[in-house]
Amino acid sequence: MKFKFHPEALTEYEDAARYHHSAVIPRIRMATPQDIIKAMVASLHQRHLKPLGFRKSGTTRIRPVEWKHVMNVQLSKWNSSEEAQFTLNLGISIEPLHGAGILPAA
């Protein structure tokens, strides 16, 4: 997915992505598209994935059920301060297949 940064269209996620004010000199940095994507993923996890049993590890979310459900957000290495892209990777891990020698060990 590709996002263009439009300062006039900032959402509730901007607050989650801002740096905190300094105690001496208040400084606020505008949220970058990457900050907004990370804040959206954090909000998605809190509101929807965590209640379903997903745990987070960095940018990966794992639901430890019989066949593990895996969701990973991968930011593009070509992102800039004005534009960002990411890839949403979805997968399952079937442990019995690893134990049976059909798939390599995870």
Image (cartoon, rainbow, N blue to C red):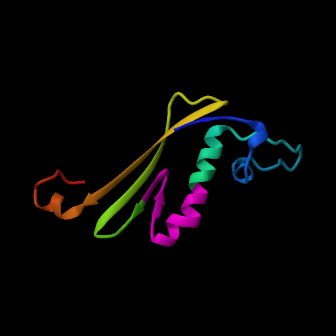
What residue is shown at x 54% (from left), y 65% (from top)? 48
Vertical comparison of 34 with 95: above or below: above
Q: Position of residue 37 (x, y in %)?
A: 60, 45
Q: Is residue 97 visible?
A: yes
Q: Quadrant of residue 8?
A: top right
Q: Residue at x 31, y 57 (%)?
A: 92
- Location of residue 47 in the rendering, given as x and y in whole percent from the top left corner: 58, 66
Image label count: 0
In this view, 24 is above or below 42? above
Where residue 11 sits: x, y (%)? 73, 49
Seen from this angle, which residue lies furthest left?
Answer: 101
Displayed quadrant of residue 85? top right
Q: What residue is rendered at 72% in x and 36% in y? A: 6
Query: Is residue 45 located in the magenta-colored stretch of the structure?
Result: yes
Q: Can you see residue 29?
A: no
Image point 58% across, 56% down: which residue? 42
Q: Determine whether, in the image, residue 70 is placed left or right of residue 77.
A: left
Residue 1: where, in percent of width, then height?
Answer: 51, 38
Q: Which residues are magenta?
A: 42-61
Magenta region includes residue 53 = yes
Q: Is residue 70 left or right of residue 55?
A: left
Task: Name the image quarter holding the C terminus.
Answer: bottom left
Along the viewing direction, whichever of 48 and 46 lies nearer the viewer: 48
Closest to the observer, 17 or 57: 17
Q: Is residue 43 above or below residue 64?
A: above
Say left or right for 9 vs 70: right
